[in-house]
Image (cartoon, rainbow, N blue to C red):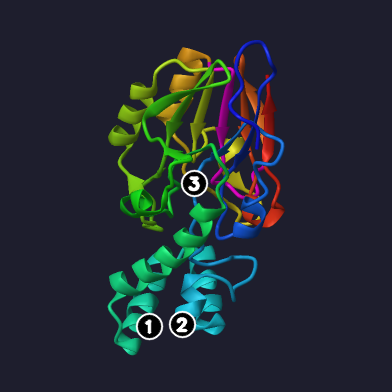
Amino acid sequence: MASTPGGNRRARVHVVSDVHGNARDLARAGDGADALICLGDLVLFLDYADHSRGIFPDLFGTENADRIVELRTARRFDEARDFQRRLWAGIGMDRATAIRTAVRKQYAELFSAFPTPTYATYGNVDVPPLWPEYAGPGTTVLDGQRVQIGGWTFGFVGGGLRTPMRTPYEIGDEEYAAKIEAVGEVDVLCTHIPPEVPELVYDTVARRFERGSRALLDAIRRTKPRYSLFGHVHQPLVRRMRIGSTECVNVGHFASTGRPWALEW
C-alpha cells in the first residue's frame, strides 16, 4: 500500500464493508491504494448463505443454524430468541463468555489482516469495547469523528439503529443523530448503515427493509458531501444513486465478493 498522498498527486482509497470473517481477501484489500477504509461488521455470527459458517454453527451445529435462519427470515424474532435460550441452557455454557471468546479469535485474525493505513468504524454486529485490544498503530478507529485523507475530509459514524434482531452495536436514533451532527460538513461521509431511502435499504434476497438513518439522509441533504459511502444491506435493490449533488454508494458485501470499492480523486 502506498503512503497517504500529498501535494497534487491523485489519491485512491479502497472501501470495504460487511467483512464477516473474510480475512483472506481483507489482507489484499488495500493493494494499490493509499488507504483502506472499513465500514464495519467484521464479525461473522452466522452466514446466511452457508449456515455451516460462523460463531453460531460452531457452537450449536448447522441444523440449529438452519432453524435460526428460518425463524429470522420469517421475522419470528421472539421464537428465534426462545429457541436460542433453550440451546444455551442445553450446553450449560455462559453465553457472554463463549461469544466474547469467539469474537476475540475472529478479531485477532481480522485486525492483523488490515494494511497500513486503515481507517475503520463499527458495524452493528461488532463489539466496540474489544477493538482497542486489536487495532494496531496502523489502524485508526473513528466514530463520530473526522480525518484528512489526500486533502479530503472523511467523516465516520459507526453502528446501527435498534431492530428486533438486537445485534451487539445498535443504538438509539438520538445517539446516532448526535454522531452525525458531530461529524459536520465533510467531503465523504462514511457510515455502516445507509440513509433511509427505500431503494437503498431494501434487501432483495432477505426480502425486507433494513433500518436506514433519517438523520443521515437529512445530513446529506443539508451538508451535501461529495459521497455517502455505506454497507449493511447485502443485496440492495439499488447500489448507487444521487441525493442532490451527493453520490450515495453501497460499497458491497465484502464477505461474498472479496473486492473493495475504489474511490479516486
Asked which quadrant contains residue 242, the reply is top right
Whether residue 58 sits left or right of residue 254 in the image: it is left
Mark 2 — residue? 60
Query: In terms of secondary structure, where does tag 2 sit?
Result: helix
Label 2, residues with CA under 10 Å away: few <14, some 14-19, many ≥20: some
Mark 1 — residue? 87
Residue in the image at 41% along x and 71% along y: 80
What is the three-letter code of the residue carrying label 1? Leu
| Residue 250 vs residue 101, the one in the foreground | 101
Mark 3 — residue? 40
Q: Which mark is residue 256?
A: none
- The disc, 3 or 1, on the residue closer to the chain's N-terminal end is 3
What is the three-letter code of the residue carrying label 3? Gly
Discs 2, 1 touching: Cβ within 8 Å: yes
Can residue 117 be seen here? The reply is yes
Residue 229: x and y in percent read 57, 32
